[in-house]
Structure formats: C-alpha cells, structure tokens
C-alpha cells in the first residue's frame, strides 16, 4: 500500500498559505474527505484559521442528498455547519454574483473518476469562469485519478457537441487529475482565472486509487467502487441506449443488459472477440429502479481480469455494437433529454460526436472504430503534457 497526502490535507496543514484568511467558499460532496473520513466542510468550519462563508454542491449534493435527476435542491443552510449551501446542479450550474457575494476564494475539492462525462469537472470549470468574471481566486485541492494518470482512450469531443457532460475537447478517458484538468481548462481552453492547485504528495501516475492508502467514498450514488470507475469510461455510453447499465443493481455499469437479450449468446459473442483484459459472464438481473425497473433483464457482467491491458471504452462500444447487431429489431437509442440537452440523442451527447453512432449503425468493424480514435489520442497525449503535475 502506497502512502499519499491528499490536496485537502496539504491545505489543512497551512490554510493561511492557500486561503490567506479570506472569506472561503467550498465546493464539495460526500467524498470530500481526508484519510480519517472527516468531511472538508466540517473541518473548514471548525478551523480557527478558515473563514467558511458558503458551501456549494455539484450533482447529488454536498452530503449526497439527491439521486440523479436534472432539477434538484436550490439552497439551504447546512445542518451541521449552519453555512448557506447552494446547488450547482439545477436551475443554476454556474455560481451567481449573489452566491459569491460573501466569498473571496473558492475552493474546489470533489473527486473525479477519470472520465470526460462526469459532471463534477464541469461544475469546476463553470465555477472557474464565475470566479474570473467576479474577481475571485480559485484553489483546487487535487486528488488522484482513481483509474491511473497514464491511460488515454477515445475520441476528442467535437466542436458543436459541447454540453454539461463535455465542455472541452478531451477524450473519454483523459488520464488527468482534477488539478491537472483545472490547469488545462484554465490555460489551454482559455478560462483564465486566478488559479492555484494544492497538489497530492506521494502519488505516482501509474497507481490506481486502491493501490494507495487514500480512502474511497462513492463520489456519486452509482459509483460504489473503484471497479465501477474502471469500467465506467466504456459503459457510460450505455446510458445513451435503452439498455440497462445496471442502475438499480449492486453493480451499476458492470452489469448491462435488456429484457430481450440472450445472456449466453451475448457473452459468447463478446468473448469470441478476445478483447484485452476482460471476460463477459452471462448474467440476468432485475433493476430496482430506472430503465427496465422490476423487469428481468439478460446480459453480461464485465469482469476485468487485467487492468493494465483492459480498454474500457473499446469494451463499452463492443457491448453496444453487439446488442445492436444481435438484436436489431429490439435495440434502440435513448430519447432526449440528457443532462440539460433537449435537442440531441443522449448517445451523441455522451460520445461528443455523431460519428460513433453512425459507425455502429453502418456496421463499421470494432477494430476500425477504435482505430478512428488513435489520432485524437496521440494529439491529446501531447496537448496535456504541459499541465501534468506528477
């Protein structure tokens, strides 16, 4: 087990260095904790050198108050601290001047899971934009990328396909920490706010989170484990179809299927492709909520055998392509809306392009689909280089 010090813990060692005793707003969620599982909001509120004046919650809330729908709580006084708490996932996603009126420095400390479509990193980006516009500083407490900081996979989001699950041209698996993303958003993509990153100490890029002593707390209700995060860059695409991505089961994103599928036929079809580092086990399940709730679904559980060779994006697209090809009369794309987008198919919003759906529908081979990403992956590997901290 490798010992690391989280950015939050580095900040709390000497808060005056980072916060200058200014009025402080904190963007946080239930996973904003230290090694002792103590929540940052509680620690900021209790610390004599920190003047906590506002709290802000991304999707699912500051302390996990909400599940996943589009309009959530707007504002309340946090019961533990008494500090005013504002939602940044509802009718407002960018902090308003009124929200920041009592804030001089805005601290962001929300774990990412290493995937482009996770909304938290865009809450960070919009907060950075608001801070620039309103003359506030931003401090990002960094945390490790839980699925390592090396691997890159998938195409870049295309211009014209921006959304709250994809504001900038980055690949589905980006291999960056939150702090590195903040630097890239700020400099490469032109936000231009007054930004400081509180680094993680002791982390090495090739480590997954469970190779460190850092605690894991599910950052969102359907991200229960590091194993979920490992498959998520691929099976998040399933949200753009009428297949169940396993929400309403104990293994979301690892279990996928639909009522009309044949689990054994699907598993055999996928295993025959010899995808690296993975085995597809036939599995039937009944989701308790969301798509196909209380219906018997048939599909596969994704078992990652070797994380070093496993390609989650390739695997997720292989699954969707298999369902499309095996069950053409039943397979369907999910209808809008998706994450505040009402005029595009959710699959295209997730993919950041219409090309991927067109490739699946027109029968392009899996190998050719993956090959179409390679230029983007090489470009991003070079583009991200100046922003790496570790």
Image (cartoon, rainbow, N blue to C red):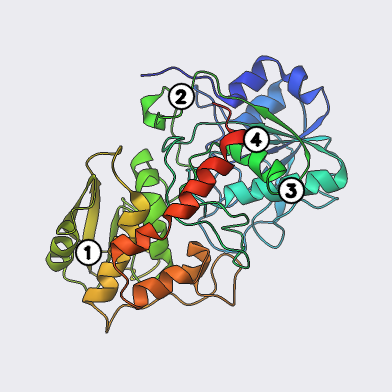
- Viewer-closest of 216 and 385: 385
Can you tell which of label 2 and label 1 is closer to the viewer? 2
Which tag, 2 or 4, sits closer to the chain's start?
A: 4
- Alpha-carbon distance for marks 2 and 1? 36 Å
Q: Which mark is residue 204?
A: 2
Query: Relative to 7, does residue 268 appear above or below in the rendering?
Result: below
Check if mark 3's residue and mark 4's residue have beta carbons within 8 Å: no
Check if mark 2's residue and mark 1's residue have beta carbons within 8 Å: no
Q: Which mark is residue 299?
A: 1
Residue at the far top: name it.
Answer: 13
Q: Position of residue 176 (x, y in %)?
A: 52, 38
Position of 235 with respect to 19 (left or right) is left
Can you tell which of label 2 and label 3 is closer to the viewer? 3
Q: Position of residue 390 (x, y in %)?
A: 54, 26
Quarter residue 369 falls in = bottom left
Can you tell which of label 4 and label 1 is closer to the viewer? 1
């Amino acid at each position: 087990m490798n010992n690391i010090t989280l950015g939050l813990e580095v900040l709390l060692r000497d808060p005056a260095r980072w916060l200058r005793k200014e009025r402080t707003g904190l963007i946080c969620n239930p996973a904003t904790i230290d090694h002792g599982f103590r929540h940052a909001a509680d620690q900021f509120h209790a610390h004599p050198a920190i003047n906590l004046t506002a709290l802000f919650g991304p999707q699912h809330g500051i302390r996990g108050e909400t599940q996943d729908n589009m309009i959530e709580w707007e504002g309340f006084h946090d019961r533990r601290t008494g500090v005013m708490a504002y939602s940044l996932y509802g009718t407002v996603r960018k902090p308003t001047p009124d929200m920041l009126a009592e804030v001089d420095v805005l601290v962001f400390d929300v774990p990412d899971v290493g995937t482009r479509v996770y909304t938290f990193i865009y809450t960070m980006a919009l907060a950075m934009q608001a801070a620039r516009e309103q003359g506030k500083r931003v401090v990002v407490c960094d945390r490790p990328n839980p699925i390592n900081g090396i691997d890159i996979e998938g195409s870049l989001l295309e211009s014209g396909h921006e959304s709250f699950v994809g504001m900038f041209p980055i690949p589905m698996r980006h291999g960056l920490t939150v702090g590195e993303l903040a630097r890239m958003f700020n400099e490469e993509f032109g936000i231009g706010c007054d930004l400081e990153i509180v680094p993680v100490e002791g982390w090495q890029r090739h480590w997954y989170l469970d190779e460190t002593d850092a605690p894991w707390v599910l950052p969102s209700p359907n991200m229960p484990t590091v194993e979920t995060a490992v498959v998520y860059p691929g099976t998040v695409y399933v949200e753009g179809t009428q297949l169940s991505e396993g929400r309403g089961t104990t293994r979301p994103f690892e279990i996928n299927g639909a009522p009309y599928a044949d689990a054994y036929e699907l598993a055999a079809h996928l295993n025959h492709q010899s995808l690296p580092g993975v085995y597809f086990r036939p599995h039937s399940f009944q989701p308790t909520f969301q798509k196909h709730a209380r219906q018997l679904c048939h599909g596969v559980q994704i078992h990652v055998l070797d994380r070093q060779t496993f390609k989650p994006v390739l695997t997720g697209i292989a699954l969707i392509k298999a369902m499309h090809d095996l069950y053409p009369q039943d397979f369907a794309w999910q209808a809008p809306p998706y994450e505040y987008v009402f005029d595009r198919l959710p699959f295209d919003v997730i993919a950041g392009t219409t090309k991927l759906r067109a490739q699946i529908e027109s029968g392009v081979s899996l190998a050719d689909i993956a090959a179409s990403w390679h230029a983007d992956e090489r470009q991003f590997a070079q583009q991200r280089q100046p922003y790496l901290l570790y």
